[in-house]
Amino acid sequence: MEANDKIVLVGAGNMATALAVALAGAGNAPLAVWSRTSESAQMLADRVGAEWCCDIDALPQADIVIISIVDSALRQVTAQVARKYPDAIILHTAGSIPMSALHESGANRYGVLYPMQTVNKTNVVPLNDVTVFIEGSDNDVTAHVERLARTISNKVVYATSEQRCSLHVAAVFACNFSNAVYNMAAEILEKNGLPFESMLPLIDEAARKMHTLSPREAQTGPAKRGDSNVMNAHKAMLDDELSAIYSQLSDYIKKRNRL
Amino acid sequence: MEANDKIVLVGAGNMATALAVALAGAGNAPLAVWSRTSESAQMLADRVGAEWCCDIDALPQADIVIISIVDSALRQVTAQVARKYPDAIILHTAGSIPMSALHESGANRYGVLYPMQTVNKTNVVPLNDVTVFIEGSDNDVTAHVERLARTISNKVVYATSEQRCSLHVAAVFACNFSNAVYNMAAEILEKNGLPFESMLPLIDEAARKMHTLSPREAQTGPAKRGDSNVMNAHKAMLDDELSAIYSQLSDYIKKRNRL
């Protein structure tokens, strides 16, 4: 990243917060934060020592504008940003929106900064070991975005908009859906007066194994063993919704075991 | 556990191995290991300094016999063990088999030892912080099993056979099904030439959050946000099998978000 790159952050949600904190940690905090609501904007700005506002036109001069907002508002906000910053590099952080959306909304130099991590503003985790996927409108911009990314992470990988979509959907499975199955376990235990805490060593170990084994190698359980008796007994204990999910995921496991 | 409790292990698979190692670590390794195959029996026996055999009748005298074998063989093997050890406490370690199965197979004093952890003989993890659920044929036996359990874990909880079934099915969701969704992510990434390694920080973080948040509080992603555009785009990228799973799990998340 150029020593003088001035960064402005449009958005103050979970990803915006994680990026702002990571950039601040790298010695180049955003100069200003924009959000639709003054509360959010101020909260993040105070956190990293930036200015804040709720009006794009009130933002200061910048070399790089990072737009990290809900997908549904991206194009409209990008159009405003592109008008204000005709020469800046405009980046978005969305998993499933192509880079071209920025161009279609008026950006001249643009790209994507996509840290592959689940983030929460109330508990920001460092991004140093998180793979940051990047893309840029031309080689020059791409190189610039890569340098920016390298200030916050030691794993920077180029990915096209199409690959990024695959990453995003893979992340939904690995992260959102694993949380969903944790929730199913929690509901079953709660119904039976048992502690969810007892699941934590399993949850931790299942995740830890991914550092040394492929998911295929690591698979265990009745579906893997083809234990129909246990599976039927389990389904009998579940309501229709969870029973259907149990069947579907067990079928998936069984198929993979035959390959 | 009584200082003089002699323990014998029937079985040499994943759970048997984890228990043998934990007991050895607590200063009371099993005296002998039985398995159907000599290879398995000898491997585990050598690991903890025990004798080994493939014939129940060749096992030495014992106060406690822990049977940790495939569910389908439990009743038959228990019958042999019960004949050889009329006075010992006979325990099984199965999630979905009621304690009464031991009694039906001839055991007089019996119970269950159920460590809530996913275990693998090639990578044995300590059981100290794992919740061990126990049950016994009468108060005296239960107290004895509890003392045994406390030598290997600092979290010992009483659970009926019915509750243990719930624990087992909850564990299938939390552990086997989370691994399954990791596998789905791996397949999507492999198809697109992307590194599964990039998922590790997400997988770790999703698991870590369970130590401080409920799964309900921790849920993120397009289904939680009600983002139909992204969900439809995702489903369009998936084959029929994964698309159906994506829909089902997203519906689950959406329902929970409305409650």
Image: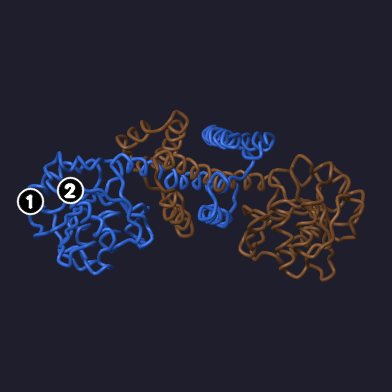
Chain colours: A blue, B brown
Placement of the N terminus of chain A among the 4 image quadrants:
bottom left
Relative to B210, A118 lies left or right? left
Counting from the top left corner in percent of width and height, residue B32 is at 83, 59
Quick one: SS at disc 2?
A: strand
Placement of the C terminus of chain A among the 4 image quadrants:
top right
Residue at (29, 61) in percent of width and height: A150
Q: Which residue is mark 1?
A: A84
Counting from the top left corner in percent of width and height, residue B138 is at 81, 55
The residue type indicated by label 2 comes to: Tyr
Counting from the top left corner in percent of width and height, residue B134 is at 71, 55
Which quadrant of the figure has residue A2? bottom left
Q: Nearer the viewer, mark 2 or mark 1?
A: 2
Counting from the top left corner in percent of width and height, residue B28 is at 78, 67
Residue B107 - label: none
Relative to B90, B71 lies left or right? left
Residue at (54, 48) in percent of width and height: B174
The residue type indicated by label 1 comes to: Lys
Residue at (42, 53) in percent of width and height: B202
Q: Which residue is mark 2?
A: A110
**Residue farthest toward the top in the current orientation of the protein:** B240
Report the front residue among B146 and A249.
A249
Report the front residue among A16 and A22.
A22
